[in-house]
């Protein structure tokens, strides 16, 4: 056993891990490597590598052997607040190492910034033992899909309206929400405010438009600034969202049922998915900000 560990340690010296920043010299080489990987969703990975760019943090780490790229891990860094304390979050959206070099695959994770929360939301089942060995917590994420076709909802006159003019939205949101608004500036994301015209209470929402079964237009909820407002006015808001964005389904992601916006409503289905989290504080509030939204 000791002899094997010595050989392994010597072998690992032949590998190097480098951090890749957006549009630096290694970025093009990395994207070229990714395009050759038949087991990756290239369009998804390429989109994420070009999303939510922060020049302080790498978009991925690459593993090289004799100056050739043999693996990479995609990283999305963000800052989130928990109990008035700002913590760095790193979401691992992709992890790929060539078959003959997987002995060194864990080196990629070792280079992720220390003292941060690490989330893995779309892992392959065969990697479970690896993540548990690396002291990740295994949790079950719920994906709740709710039917919002208008003929299933009672149509009635309400005091709510949707604001999607960017200048008007910015008048209704705080500084932290403005950062989210600016970061989610891709066409697939819908940013809007739902306003109660009488009480002036409102809710800022970021939704991701995707297609289920290639034809069911779905809005996955990425961010909701006022969950209580949304839950309380659920029956009025669904027809409004349906009418405005022509969506058939609404999707949401949560760990605990208490965090769900609409799990107790009719015409819902819940799909469970295993995820992994490391370094999270005790009262960790789960969200999918700055991560993939298609699983």
Image: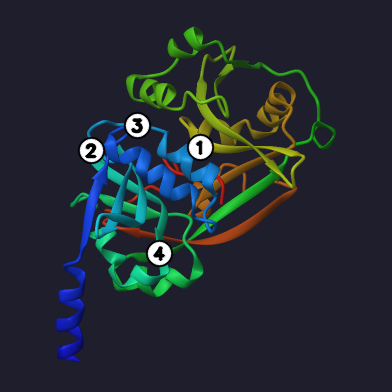
Vertical order, 270 against 176 (above or below):
below
Task: Report crowding for label 1: few under 14, some 14 to 19, many 20 or more residues within 10 A (C-alpha).
Answer: many
Q: Position of residue 138 (x, y in %)?
A: 40, 66
Secondary structure under the numbered disc 1 in the rendered image: strand
- Residue receiving disc 2: 86
Vertical order, 162 against 264 (above or below):
above
Mark 4 to mark 1 CA distance (whole Å): 33 Å
- Residue receiving disc 4: 98
Q: Position of residue 144 (x, y in %)?
A: 62, 50
| Residue 80 visible to an observer of this rendering | no
Q: Quadrant of residue 10?
A: bottom left
Q: Is residue 248 left or right of residue 179?
A: right
Q: Is residue 211 left or right of residue 11?
A: right
Mark 4 to mark 2 CA distance (whole Å): 36 Å
Residue sitting at 74 percent across and 23 percent down?
243
Q: Are marks 4 and 1 in contact (CB under 8 Å)?
A: no
- Residue receiving disc 1: 222
Q: Position of residue 154 (x, y in %)?
A: 81, 31
Q: Of discs 4 and 2, which sits in the foreground?
A: 4
Q: Are marks 1 and 2 in contact (CB under 8 Å)?
A: no
Mark 1 to mark 2 CA distance (whole Å): 20 Å
Q: Of discs 4 and 3, which sits in the foreground?
A: 4
Q: Are marks 3 and 1 in contact (CB under 8 Å)?
A: no
Q: Are marks 4 and 2 in contact (CB under 8 Å)?
A: no
Residue sitting at 49 percent across and 64 percent down?
124
Instruction: Identify the mark nearer the N-term, 3 or 2.
Output: 3
Instruction: Identify the mark nearer the N-term, 4 or 1.
Output: 4
Residue sitting at 43 percent across and 69 percent down?
127
Instruction: Identify the mark nearer the N-term, 4 or 2.
Output: 2
Q: Which mark is residue 53?
A: 3
Mark 4 to mark 3 CA distance (whole Å): 27 Å
Q: Is residue 79 left or right of residue 115?
A: right
């Amino acid at each position: 056993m000791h002899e094997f560990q010595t050989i392994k340690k010597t072998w690992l010296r032949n590998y190097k891990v480098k951090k890749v920043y957006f549009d630096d010299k290694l970025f093009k080489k990395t994207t070229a490597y990714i395009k050759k990987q038949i087991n990756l969703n290239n369009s998804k990975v390429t989109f994420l590598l070009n999303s939510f760019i922060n020049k302080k943090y790498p978009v991925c780490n690459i593993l090289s052997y004799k100056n050739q790229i043999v693996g990479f891990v995609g990283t999305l860094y963000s800052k989130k607040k928990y109990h008035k304390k700002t913590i760095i979050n790193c979401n691992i959206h992709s992890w790929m190492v060539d078959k003959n070099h997987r002995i060194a695959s864990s080196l990629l994770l070792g280079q992720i910034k220390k003292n941060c929360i690490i989330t893995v939301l779309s892992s392959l089942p065969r990697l479970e033992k690896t993540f548990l060995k690396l002291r990740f917590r295994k949790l079950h994420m719920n994906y709740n899909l709710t039917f919002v076709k208008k003929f299933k909802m009672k149509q009635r006159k309400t005091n709510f309206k949707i604001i999607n003019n960017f200048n008007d939205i910015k008048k209704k949101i705080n500084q932290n929400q403005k950062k989210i608004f600016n970061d989610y500036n891709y066409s697939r994301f819908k940013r809007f405010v739902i306003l109660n015209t009488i009480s002036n209470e409102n809710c800022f929402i970021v939704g991701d438009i995707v297609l289920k079964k290639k034809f069911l237009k779905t809005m996955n909820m990425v961010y909701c600034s006022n969950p209580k407002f949304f839950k309380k006015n659920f029956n009025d808001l669904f027809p409004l969202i349906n009418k405005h964005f022509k969506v058939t389904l609404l999707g949401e992601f949560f760990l605990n049922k208490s965090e769900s916006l609409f799990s107790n409503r009719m015409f819902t289905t819940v799909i469970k998915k295993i995820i992994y989290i490391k370094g999270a504080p005790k009262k960790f509030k789960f969200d999918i900000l700055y991560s993939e939204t298609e699983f």
